[in-house]
Image: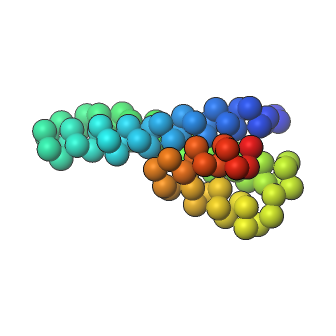
């Protein structure tokens, strides 16, 4: 199955949003208001999207002939809030 740039862009956006929801909504609910349910749900979704993002980045590395430095930057952006939005603008 071939992954298109458009599909990777969608995965990137969803991964970024899930990370921001996890950090900005779910974690405060867990630690301030003692409601851990949201972390379980959003955390699982974010974990799946993270794996898809990293796998997609490796695929795009080959497809778009990125340098190893570009691949490193794209993957490192996955652990930064708003990082995948930067990747969409600069690399896709």
**Residue at the image position 29 percent from the left and 37 percent from the top:** 25
Q: Nearer the viewer, residue 39 or 8?
A: 8
Residue 78 spot, x, y in % from top left? 55, 52
Q: Quadrant of residue 18?
A: top left
**Residue at the image position 74 percent from the left and 32 percent from the top:** 6
Residue 37 spot, x, y in % from top left? 25, 34
| Horizontal side of residue 21 vs 32, given as left or right | right
Residue 66 higher or lower than 20, as above or below: below
| Horizontal side of residue 54 vs 44, given as left or right | right
Q: Nearer the viewer, residue 92 or 2?
A: 92
Q: Nearer the viewer, residue 91 or 60?
A: 91
Residue 71 spot, x, y in % from top left? 71, 60
Q: Is residue 52 visible?
A: no
**Residue at the image position 34 percent from the left and 45 percent from the top:** 23
Q: Is residue 84 visible?
A: yes
Residue 72 higher or lower than 16, as above or below: below
| Horizontal side of residue 68 vs 83, given as left or right | right
Q: Quadrant of the N terminus?
A: top right
The single residue placed furthest to the left in the displayed view is 33
Q: Quadrant of residue 44?
A: top left
Q: Nearer the viewer, residue 78 or 83?
A: 83
The single residue placed furthest to the front in the displayed view is 89
Residue 6 higher or lower than 66, as above or below: above
């Amino acid at each position: 199955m071939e992954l298109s740039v458009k599909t990777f862009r969608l995965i990137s956006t969803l991964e970024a949003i899930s990370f921001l929801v996890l950090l900005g909504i779910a974690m405060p609910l867990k630690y301030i208001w003692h409601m851990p349910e949201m972390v379980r749900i959003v955390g699982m979704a974010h974990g799946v999207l993270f794996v898809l993002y990293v796998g997609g980045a490796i695929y795009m590395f080959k497809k778009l002939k990125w340098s190893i430095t570009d691949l490193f930057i794209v993957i490192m952006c996955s652990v930064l809030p708003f990082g995948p939005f930067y990747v969409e603008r600069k690399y896709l």
